[in-house]
Amino acid sequence: MTTLIGSCKCGKVRVAVRGRPARIGLCHCTDCRQESGSAFTFFGVWPASQFESKGDTKEFEGRQFCPSCGSRLFSADESEAEIKLGVLNEAPTPLTPTYELWTKRRESWLQPVEGAVQFLEDRT
Ligand SMILES: [Zn+2]
Ligand SMILES: [Zn+2]
């Protein structure tokens, strides 16, 4: 089974995901814009049992980040873990978005990802 590994910018927090993700997304919502400081987030969702992290994180509204360098890393509960894919070591990643959220907030110069299900707001 494929394992993808990643870390925050300073390296104090490490993450790993095993096997196939449940889904891969882009989100253009205002929360994602503000928390990332960018125009959208690129994330993957795995069953919680296929996700591991090492190192201390801090949390804001369920989103875990590195308290030393500020990298946004993941959100996780008992069932699923959502990983910010920009933290993976492999760039580009072998992962392609299967859906896009909040396309009404997408920058006008960005094109929809071919084949990805488009949602005007949250996933329905
Ligand atoms: Zn860090
Ligand atoms: Zn969002």
Image (spheres, rainbow, N blue to C red):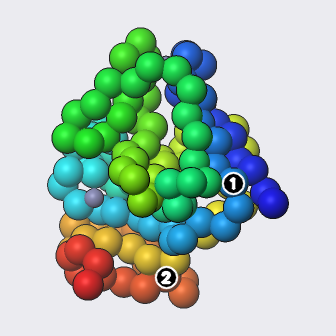
Quadrant where the C terminus sits is bottom left
The N terminus: image quadrant: bottom right
Above or below, comparing residue 94 to residue 96 in the picture:
above
Question: Mark 1 vs ligand 1: CB under 8 Å?
Answer: no
Looking at the rendered structure, the secondary structure element under dot 1 is strand
The residue that label 1 is drawn on is: 18
Farthest top residue in view: 68
| Residue depicted at x 61% and y 54% | 50
> Along the horizontal axis of the image, is 60 left or right of 46?
left
Residue at x 69% of width, y 54% of height: 18
Residue type at numbered disc 1: Arg
For marks 1 and 2, give the CA distance.
23 Å
Where's residue 6, x and y in %?
64, 36
Residue 107: tell me if it is visible: no
Question: Quick check: 33 left or right of 67?
Answer: left
> Which x, y percent locates residue 116?
49, 82
The image quadrant of residue 68 is: top left
Q: Amino acid at mark 2?
A: Ala
Please name which of the two marks, 1 or 2, marks the residue nearer to the observer: 1
Disc 2 marks which residue? 116
